[in-house]
Amino acid sequence: MNSTGIDYLPIVLQIGVIGGFVAFVLFITHYLGPRLKSKKKDSNWECGIESEGNARFPVSVRYFMTAILFVLFDVEVIFFYPYAVNFKALQLEGLLAVILFVAFFLIGFFYVLKKGALEWEK
Amino acid sequence: MDALIIVFVTGLISMFIAMAKKPVLVLATAMIGLSSALALMINQWWTGTGFIQLNYEGLLFDKPSILYSSLAISFVLLIIAGGYSYFKQEVEHTGEYISLLIFSLVGAMCMIAFTDLFMFFLGLEILSIPIYVMVGSKKRDILSTEASLKYFFTGSLATGILLFGTAWVYGATGSFKINEISAAILDGSAKGALLNVGILIMMAAFLFKVGAAPFHFWSPDVYGGAPTIVTGFMAAVVKLAGLFAFLKLFTFTFWGAYPLWSGALFGIIILTVIVGNLSALAQTRFKRMLAFSSIANAGYALIAIMNQSNWSTWNLWMYIYGYGFAIIALIIISLLVNDENDSIEGFRGVGRKNPFIGFVLTVSLLSLAGVPPLAGFFGKYMVFAAAFKQYPVLVITAIATSGIGMVYYLRFFMTAMAKEENESTVEKLKPSILQTIVLLICAIALLIGGYIAY
């Protein structure tokens, strides 16, 4: 518990490095790189194609739902890899744990189906 | 442990049973499940073991944990019963509302019973994430959405900071288990600077979660924007879990580093009670006033954490007991009044319209203000009396500011009891049977609080 001021030097250094890096980057970007300005480049949707219509209209969230659910179940699959490697070592206890884990996901999947989150035409 | 599993399964079942589009079924499931969990907790208190023998090294339901868990379950029971009239308005989502609150309770119980920092962090997240969703559950209300977003961003930042602090503490002590950390700090094998920074960072994150003064800026907006019943949940259950985890982690685990964090906490408590009470004076909206009052109350509760004795667990419990029941009663009355602007003026004449509600309102406000025969007084008295010898300045500041607190509680009381100007438009306030029962339970709990204290 008895720490002297010198012990905190690494922490102060770390804070200094963080602050210094931010300040340095903010400063240097103004000097590096050419500054070109044109009407097209300053438009808020510059991708080489003429923008058409208004961007402010409601977008369907169905794709978002599907994507986020994909991520969820993808993570589940990733958890199987370490289990597959240790399949023999974990014995019955490991199997039960994994069955419980998959059961929770199945309950979630059942809920998603029931709520109609995957129905595209709705 | 068995109670925890029952609570979790109750949440799952009430989520699925809502598919039948019958809100009564959801309510019944939640009530039965939570009551049986409460019964299991009481059983474990008397027999010392759970109904089923289940052990996990990360969780330990010892006597203090059972005491706090039972209180948390009771709060959630009352909140769900009292808020049912609000939950059933949208039949589509009744199941989600109720089961999210129950899942949040699971997190609270993990946070209460943890024995290692990993389980604690998991509990904190299980507690917080359903609350982020519930705060934004009024989807068409712009204030609710704003509150949810603000709470999510600031809350996840605080979580990140907490993890950072945990990593420092782990680096210094080499363990996640709280008894090993405690031993490492006491025998001096933990490295000084690493540990000190870790503890202070963790403390900052904790103070954010309980809403103490320099970290309180999120709470008025979030409390004000959230649906009324969720505000009650945050004030009662989230504070309970946060404060008990704070007590367990700091007063008992980081005790070896007491000189370090007690100095910081001392200043923060003084700032919290002053800022909370003075800001509450200026509020015209009910839920914002409640938010600042809850900041001030968090400050008083933190005093229990400042002094380690075998009684500090019990003192804090008594304090939260008085505070929680009063807040739940006030929140349900506010749900009944249902003023559009949520202004304090909207409560004008409530006591005359329905004398029963007037009575409950009086009891809970006087309890919050700390008037003798009620539970709030005993909580405050026990916390202050325990700390007075060691920190006279702190306790005197707290008593002085709770005098300021009395001003806005009593002003609110006067408004609620005043005569309404245009008598002709008076419509009777009609609480449902469930809400009447909940209000009655809260009032009784506040009235007999003093007997429990002895």
Image (spheres, coloured by chain):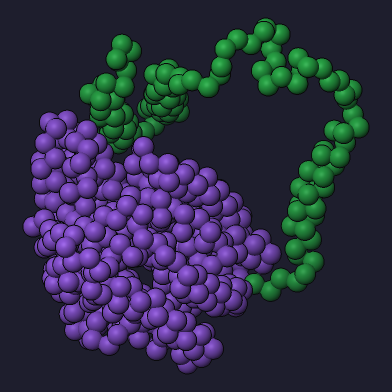
Residue drawn at x 25%, y 69% is B421
Q: Quadrant of the C terminus of chain B?
A: bottom left
* Residue A53 x, y percent position in the rendering: 57, 12
Up the image or down, B317 lies above or below B232; here it is below
Q: Colour of chain B?
A: purple
Q: Tell me, by letter, which chain the rendering colours green.
A: A
Q: Is residue B94 visible?
A: yes
Q: Is residue A77 visible?
A: no
- Residue farthest toward the left in the current orientation of the protein: B433
Residue A97 or A85: which is nearer the viewer?
Answer: A97
- Residue farthest toward the top in the current orientation of the protein: A49
* Residue B163 x, y percent position in the rendering: 54, 50
- The number of numbered discs placed on residues in the rendered structure image is 0
Residue drawn at x 29%, y 29% is A108
Residue drawn at x 82%, y 39% is A26
Residue A118 or B12: which is nearer the viewer?
Answer: A118
Q: Is residue B11 left or right of residue B183?
A: left
* Residue B45 x, y percent position in the rendering: 19, 67
Residue B153 or A122: which is nearer the viewer?
Answer: A122
Q: Quadrant of the N terminus of chain B?
A: bottom left
Residue B127 or B415: which is nearer the viewer?
Answer: B415
